[in-house]
Amino acid sequence: MKVLVVGGGGREHAICWKLAQSPKVTELYCAPGNGGIGQVAACVPIGATDIEGMVRWAKENAMDFVVVAPDDPLALGMVDALEAAGIRAFGPRANAAIIEASKAFSKELMAKYHIPTAKYRTFTEEQAALDYIDAQGAPIVVKADGLALGKGVTVATTVEEARQAVREMMEDGKFGASGSTVVIEECMTGPEVTVLAFADGETVVPMLSSQDHKRAYDGNQGPNTGGMGAFCPSPNYTPEIARRCEETIFRPTLAAMKAEGRPFNGVIYFGLMLTPDGPKVVEYNARFGDPETQPLLSMLDTDLMDIFEACVDGTLGQMDIRWKDGAACCLVLASGGYPLSYQKGYPISGLEQVPEWATVFHAGTKLSNGVYTTNGGRVLGVTATGDNLNQAVARAYEAASPIRWTDMHYRTDIGKVWVD
């Protein structure tokens, strides 16, 4: 089977790495890919949001299956376009990807179908949003309605911080059209947990629980990023909580999307808060999370290609998806200054010294004349497994220790909040 993966980050490297292990996959391509993805797939220089170019290349090169991994092409309808061209594709159609592309839509869906989440209001006028913040006080959460690379959320501890977030989104256009509408929510409390789940429109099958670390610096300080590290499973996600989530969140969400004429096929990401009143939805995503995908796929013990086909064919309920025992941790090595301004083009050393038992997923790298250089904010995701979370975390840091480049930055406390 000839398979194309759309995207070029750490998540896509992990997907390609896992698909390359499938006996079904005879040829593997990634567009646009990155320096490291070239180790396991042939990279094709097509932008992830170039729908016309991607469909044309897939047709001309007789792809049997395309995996659309990032949020933007999903929201823009790449799966719809591939299907119209007669190519099987993994990922939600645009009318289902809206569950991530519009926070206003997702909040209205949860309200309509009684899926537990934070109380909220949606605003299209800046002054009305500011007045609401003044009336509610802080802490309070401000979210850009549309896609913002995982950075369109401000958890404001003061009224002025919340007002500033609204002004940046609605007045300054920090996130472009994505911030022209804002959602303002109550600030929920409790441990956060992520559960990604496979879905075929009818059936939803949760993966292991996981935990991302969004803030740039140790102690959960600094600006939000796309994610500085992740581990799975989460010790906070007990079997009882898992049961409640399936009954009150996972299955009702899939049923709600079907009832709305928007059946969801692909991976749905449930960002959860384990509040004193029970688990509630913080956000939905319409695809694999990054960097959660790296540890999750390291723990998957079932052929990923089989799962992807089941999601497309509507046979997910017939699958027995298995996971390895133990735990996994991904440590993100980033460029100094990320997520704000940072330099690219620094040579990366030490990759050949990483132990064989760890996997280095490339997120923002370029390969030139046999040398890997930095080409993004998040550069590498060093991932290791272990018998337990303590061991997985320790092994990830040990594996990362030989790697160096100018101004390299990483958090030293990934997993530590739950391990110590």
Image (cartoon, grey):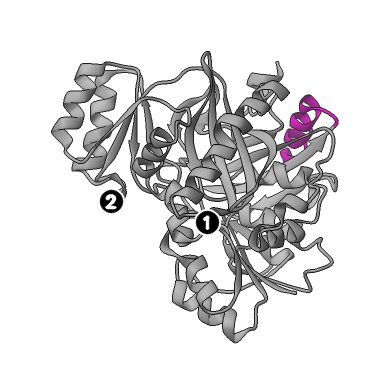
Query: Which of the 4 image quarters holds residue 269?
Result: top right
**Residue drawn 75% across the image and 56% down it:** 304
Q: Is residue 182 magenta?
A: no
* Residue 51, label in figure: none
Q: Which mark is residue 70?
A: 1
Q: Dividing the image into 4 quarters, which one contains the C terminus?
A: top right
30 to the left or right of 176: right
Q: Residue at x 80, y 68 (%)?
A: 24
For residue 5, say whether it is visible: no
Q: What's under tag 1, amino acid-wise?
A: Pro
The amino acid beneath tag 2 is: Gly
Disc 2 from disc 1: Cα separation: 19 Å
> How many residues crowd mark 2 within 10 Å: few (<14), some (14–19), many (20+)?
some
Seen as rendered, the residue at the extreme left is 127
Range of magenta residues:
387-401
Q: Viewed as shown, does residue 41 lie left or right of 164?
A: right
Using a 10 Å C-alpha cutoff, classify the residue at mark 1 as few (fewer than 14 neighbours), some (14 to 19) or many (20 or more): many
Magenta: predominant secondary structure element? helix
x and y percentages locating residue 309 in the rendered image: 70, 62
Q: Residue furthest bottom?
A: 60
Say whether disc 2 or disc 1 marks the residue closer to the N-terminus.
Answer: 1
Please provide percent x and percent y for residue 20.
77, 63
Who is closer to the viewer here, 12 or 240? 240
Q: Which residue is mark 2?
A: 176
Tell me which corner region of the image, top left, top right, bottom left or bottom right, holds residue 230: top right
